Amino acid sequence: MESFFTFLERRVDDCSSLLCVGLDPHKADLEQNNALSALKFSLNLVKKTAPYAAAFKPNAAFFEQFGADGWKALEEVVQAVQEQSDRLGSKILVVLDAKRGDISSTAEAYAISAFKTLKADCITLNPYLGKDSIDPFIAEPEKGVFLLCKTSNPGSGDLQDLPLQSGELLYEHVAGLAGQWNTKNNIGLVVGATQPEAMKRVRKVNPSAWLLAPGVGAQGGDLESALRAGLRPDGKGVLLPVSRAISRAADVALAAANLRDEVMAVTRAIQHP
Amino acid sequence: MESFFTFLERRVDDCSSLLCVGLDPHKADLEQNNALSALKFSLNLVKKTAPYAAAFKPNAAFFEQFGADGWKALEEVVQAVQEQSDRLGSKILVVLDAKRGDISSTAEAYAISAFKTLKADCITLNPYLGKDSIDPFIAEPEKGVFLLCKTSNPGSGDLQDLPLQSGELLYEHVAGLAGQWNTKNNIGLVVGATQPEAMKRVRKVNPSAWLLAPGVGAQGGDLESALRAGLRPDGKGVLLPVSRAISRAADVALAAANLRDEVMAVTRAIQHP
């Protein structure tokens, strides 16, 4: 059965890359603080880095803040990724970083928004509301989700690190639930790359899930320790979102190509020591 | 100091109502499945029920699913509430039901989206990412948040009911954190009205917070038991979102007026038995 992660794995093979290029049009990076500048910023990144990107990850917030114009820009960005996929003859996945989480008909409406209106392939979701809040997003195997599990911000311990009576930490429990729920091969987990210990714990509970692991590059994560902790034996299973380390480089294509190569070199060294 | 909840309490006094009229343009309730019909549906509710509404709660998902047009409609809906506030000479609050949750500059962008672009007064947020994911939304006391605490959906137990080593349930811990964090009187909690036991537990941990308590009306919650469990001694502290019980009534104004009166009658009976 074709599923989101079989598509992702095909693309990873096609471009020899575990990179997920983040499309985060921060105010600080825009010519003007408006939707048009956000669009230009994003289209430039898509065009120049597509050959090295397993996926693109537009961050909904940076578009949403411009209202209707921002939402229109976001639609165009997803279309631009589709055009690059057609050009390269290899489907680049779009992970909408939206961190939604709601129930019943509201969750269904968010799934329509992400997958039908915007035509993204995958969305980041918050697990706090439980299984039925996830269901509308995983109904079709070719659409995927990454559930927030262990993030790297200062407040991530407020809930995620709480020890449960079962002996697990809360985020380990989330990792386990994701494993149970993943009957269609379309549920992954968000685990910060800056915390290899957490990644190891997640891997113990859930040996096979794809991890979306932000923190490499501008956020200062150590690439090798993250990959050692998170990679599956097949050399896959970790998708590395990178934003500023690429977008703020003098030559974004070169920065993406170099990072892709570095990731692959580290991956090979881990697999064949 | 003026804060979101002092504004809300003033409005509750002005209209003798604890109702929060939900603006949920479900496909099933629309003439056509598009943004224009969603707008008409919402504007009609705003116009007819404003005198009985302490707040309106537009649900972002039902607008977002229509893309840029939906987002534009959502802006117009918030403006329409503002116009009713001006007409009535009493500020009706807008709670954007968006259940966002992200970190650092992304959280800031969502706060800009909700409070500056859309001009909402309050937003629902997910607590899973911790304190710093909340901070950008509570920086100004006149803007407020309701944090998801204990929801009423089937999967709410997957995380929220987990017993912690401390002896608390996870949602009780969230209720306690909200109390600690609420230094500006602008943090409330979402607790399903259909679960008075949970509401009692939340009240024990957090005696003063406003609770946004969905489930009365079409979802079948028992009004009296919810109010008994959740009301503060001042007869406030519970905001009751109602959607279909009003929007699907033959006369929406009458339905809102009657429900307002019923809530006030129950409140008085509880306060003066």
Image (cartoon, coloured by chain):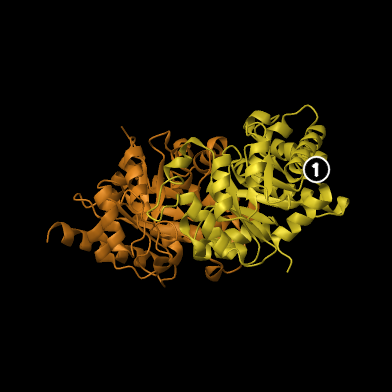
Chain colours: A yellow, B orange
Tell which residue pokes out farthest to the bottom in this image.
B250
- Chain assignment, label 1: A
Q: Which residue is mark 1?
A: A52
Camera-side residue: A43 or A258? A258
What residue do we see at 51% from left, 61% from top? A133
Residue A245 position, x and y percent, is 70, 32
Camera-side residue: A17 or A84? A17
In the displayed structure, B65 sits above or below A270; it is below
Tell which residue pokes out farthest to the left in this image.
B273
Q: Is residue A199 left or right of residue B270?
A: right
Residue A139 position, x and y percent, is 62, 67
Residue A266 position, x and y percent, is 74, 39
Is any atom of residue B131 visible in this view?
yes
Q: Is residue B48 left or right of residue B98?
A: left
Q: Residues within 10 Å of mark 1 (few under 14, many from 20)?
A: many
Residue A132 position, x and y percent, is 51, 65
What residue do we see at 36% from left, 60% from top? B192
